[in-house]
Amino acid sequence: MPEADQEGQRYAPDQPQATPGFYLKGSHQLDWGMKNRLARVFDPASGRTVMLAVDHGYFQGPTTGLERIDLSIVPLLPSCDALFCTRGILRSVIPAHCQKPMVLRASGGPSILRDELSDEQIAMDMDDAVRLNAAGVGIQVFIGGEHETRSVHNMTRLVDAGLRAGVPVMGITAVGKTMVRDAKYFRLACRIIAELGAQYVKTYFVEDGFETVTASCPVPIVMAGGKKLAELEALTMAYNAVQQGAAGVDMGRNIFQSEAPQAMIAAVAAVVHKNMTPKEAFELFNSLKRRAAAVSEVVRTANTG
Ligand code: R5P
């Protein structure tokens, strides 16, 4: 067994990796179909994406804000760049005329009732992702978790299937409850996921050193939102992530658990695609929230009058 090296220090975050011939980091040597699917998710104008993550039910059941995806999420579809959902929700709830790209959850296994969530398997054939016209698939990778090797192997099998079909794989850094969420851990996890073939990586933001996580990962990183924060805090986190090299977000609870989800996704999109500052985006959120409340009041008065 080779002696473990010290982790390097030369991340050079101010020298972005060259992207000759295609705008997405590390994607220029992929095949046409793969690039085309990536271009549906990552806006070619900004090079970034606002993915709306609503896959939580695959292990949590009807999560707060997702009790009725037809009522809470379908109205938000026009405002996201892509939806991250399960194939069950796609077939049962998402209208097939929807033109938004769909990225499908492809792993599953233990429910929230179990302590050890890393015991996952591949939970969808690539054939079905193609049949559903998916723009990509996503899978958890539990680096340092009890079932680390299996989850890595799940991802590499999915990557092989994705390369045959031209479907990009989003590898997701899944962090055990007791593990430290710092830049050192995420550099390790994101880099392993990219080295083993994922076309992009979803990971959490860390306050200290996030730019080293993005700089040392040769493919795009999208930021996961995590638990619900105050809106200004969530917008600040998204802003810091994209300013420090993330190619967008895949956020769920901070959007659909907001008191004004439509206003929140618009504010997140302004941060991601227009580099709007957190303060300006929060003002946008508040003004859209006020406008939505005024419209509801007019409708309520009309219906009761
Ligand atoms: C991913 O692993 C989860 O299933 C969600 O997609 C992810 O946590 C993003 O959602 P949230 O922003 O609510 O954390």
Image (cartoon, rainbow, N blue to C red):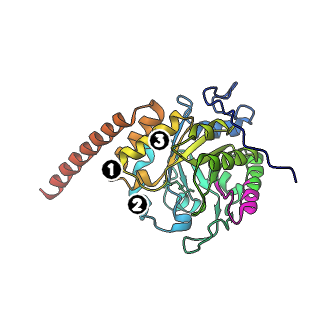
C-alpha span from label 3 to label 2 = 20 Å
Q: Quadrant of the N terminus?
A: bottom right
Q: Position of residue 139 (x, y in %)?
A: 65, 55
Q: Quadrant of the C terminus?
A: bottom left
**Which quarter of the picture shows residue 63?**
bottom left
Judged left or right of residue 61, residue 257 is left
Q: Is mark 1 within 8 Å of ligand 1?
A: no
Q: Is mark 2 within 8 Å of ligand 1?
A: no
C-alpha span from label 2 to label 1 = 11 Å
Judged left or right of residue 274, residue 181 is right
Q: Position of residue 45 (x, y in %)?
A: 53, 28
C-alpha span from label 1 to label 3 = 17 Å
- Range of magenta residues: 139-155
Amino acid type for the residue under numbered disc 2: Gly
Nearest the eye: 110 or 145: 145
* Residue beneath the point at 59% across and 74% down: 114
Relative height, residue 176 to residue 74 (above, below): below
Q: Position of residue 71 (x, y in %)?
A: 38, 58
Q: Residue tagged by mark 1?
A: 260
**Residue 154, magenta (yes or no):** yes
* Residue beneath the point at 73% across and 59% down: 154
Q: Residue tagged by mark 3?
A: 238
Q: Residue tagged by mark 2?
A: 65
Instruction: Give the class, few, some or many, for how many residues have Cα within 10 Å of label 2's Cα (few <14, many ≥20).
Output: some
Amino acid type for the residue under numbered disc 3: Ala
**Which quarter of the picture shows residue 263?**
top left
Nearest the eye: 127 or 149: 149
